[in-house]
Image (spheres, rainbow, N blue to C red):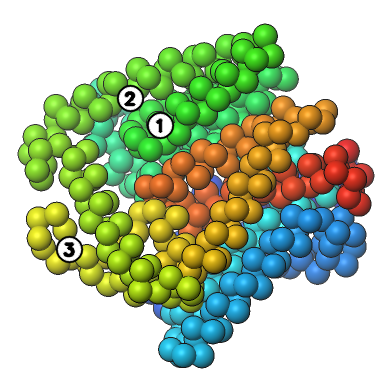
Amino acid sequence: MNNTKYIDRSFISLSVLFIILPIGIGGLDHYQLKSGYLTLGLVVFIFPGIITVSLAYLNNRTTITLWCIRLLALIIFLSVGGKQGVSNSDLLSFLGTIGLTLFYEFGFYIIKSGQLDYYLQFMVFSTALLCIYLLIFLVPLVLENPMPSFYMPIIRDNYHHAWPNNFSVYLLINILMAIYLGQANKAYLLCFFIIFSVFILTFCRTSFGALGIIGIMMTHDKFKGKLLYLPTIMLTILMICVLFVSLNRVKERSSASINGTKIVHSFKMRKARYSAVVGYIKKNYITGSGFRSASENIRTMTTYQGKITKMISTHNDYLDIMARSGVIYSFLFFGFVVYIIKAGLLDKGRRKKELKFFSYSLIAIMISSMTQNVLKVPLTSSLFWVFIAFIGCVSAKRDGEVLIETCS
């Protein structure tokens, strides 16, 4: 291995570990930062090199579109800031939003260095090791108390992500990547079973539904090709079983929760949140809050019980982005994402299988965004932007754009 490849792999490995092992690195204002933001710091460090050395980056239509979206975000922020003023919290909220998009440059760096396979392999293998660590804590507790709602605090206590649902989405993406890698190397199917076992224990209903939809899409695609890949069938069957068992267990063991089951309570609380956010959007539909924190502009909400409580989170990336940026930016942003997903699904080149799995992953993230804010944390937003870079780079090769050698 030459020195350049060693440096590239070391950088990628360190970045992945920063993201999946989020150690607290302090706070700014009221925001608590995790070590995943250190990866963004590393990307900023190499950013000038990406721009000055690679014509592929400058000439790529995905890159150009993304910079237009960033520029529009800046215009909206300055426009609202000129009228309302800019506090430290406002500035941090805007920089955090734009900063997370720099994971696109991280993905481009991975492609440019020719380390795409290494990145996927290292991520899946590291996640499998992390899941083994969690299983050491979880298995004895599951045997002792088979109550799904009991597992999430254990995951939270032993793996420091504030929202286990975001972790569930991250595991979902790794399950898809394990299936992809397992087609060439069956050893990754072992990683698939290890990761899947912890994924089940998160009991995140949205992630289960997302994986079920992706499983159906994958099965349909394989049937069309007259070749059915076994893990796809297993995935669909397992998800149906898991959904049935988990929903019944939650229903049976949550009689003490508010208004019947926790599912009903969760649904009604989200409905109340969404109503509060939609009300704010109707009043600020052009520029939103100017990328200020939605929870700071929508401070309270009325629950289904008629109580006024603090709005902690929107629990919906679609509404969150619309409330913070307005309908014009939201339309362009989500249109951009749909275009990328479509490009990956419809690509007919020799890397079409690879691109489809990246598109499947983006679809899973977008489904999960309906009930969570997965685009606001490095753990999941890193994968979102990295996969956009992968699809944008490889699909551009087919369209005849100037691309780097390693994309071929």
Q: Position of residue 274 (x, y in %)?
A: 30, 57
Q: Position of residue 82 (x, y in %)?
A: 51, 90
Q: Is residue 99 visible?
A: yes
Task: In this rendered view, identify the residue nearer to me: 371 or 175.
Answer: 371
Alpha carbon distance from label 1 to label 2: 8 Å
Q: Residue at x 67, y 46 (%)?
A: 340
Q: Kindly indicate the quadrant of the structure image that contains residue 148.
A: top left
Q: Residue at x 79, y 56 (%)?
A: 61
Viewport quadrant of the C terminus: top right
Q: Is residue 320 above or below residue 388?
A: below
Q: Residue at x 62, y 13 (%)?
A: 223
Q: Which residue is mark 2?
A: 243
Discs 1, 2 touching: Cβ within 8 Å? yes
Which mark is nearer the camera, 3 or 2? 3
Q: Residue at x 82, y 46 (%)?
A: 396
Disc 1 packing (10 Å; few <14; some 14–19; many ≥20)? some
Disc 3 packing (10 Å; few <14; some 14–19; many ≥20)? some
Q: Is residue 183 left or right of residue 271?
A: right
Secondary structure at numbered mark 3: strand
Alpha carbon distance from label 3 to label 2: 30 Å
Secondary structure at numbered mark 2: helix
Question: Residue 302 has which mark?
Answer: 3
- Mark 3 vs mark 2: which is more N-terminal? 2
Task: In this rendered view, identify the residue nearer to me: 117 or 304.
Answer: 304
Q: Kindly indicate the quadrant of the structure image that contains residue 341.
A: top right
Q: Give the amino acid type for the residue marked by disc 2 in the picture.
A: Leu
Q: Give the amino acid type for the residue marked by disc 1 in the picture.
A: Gly
Alpha carbon distance from label 3 to label 1: 28 Å
Q: Give the amino acid type for the residue marked by disc 3 in the picture.
A: Thr
Q: Which residue is mark 1?
A: 209
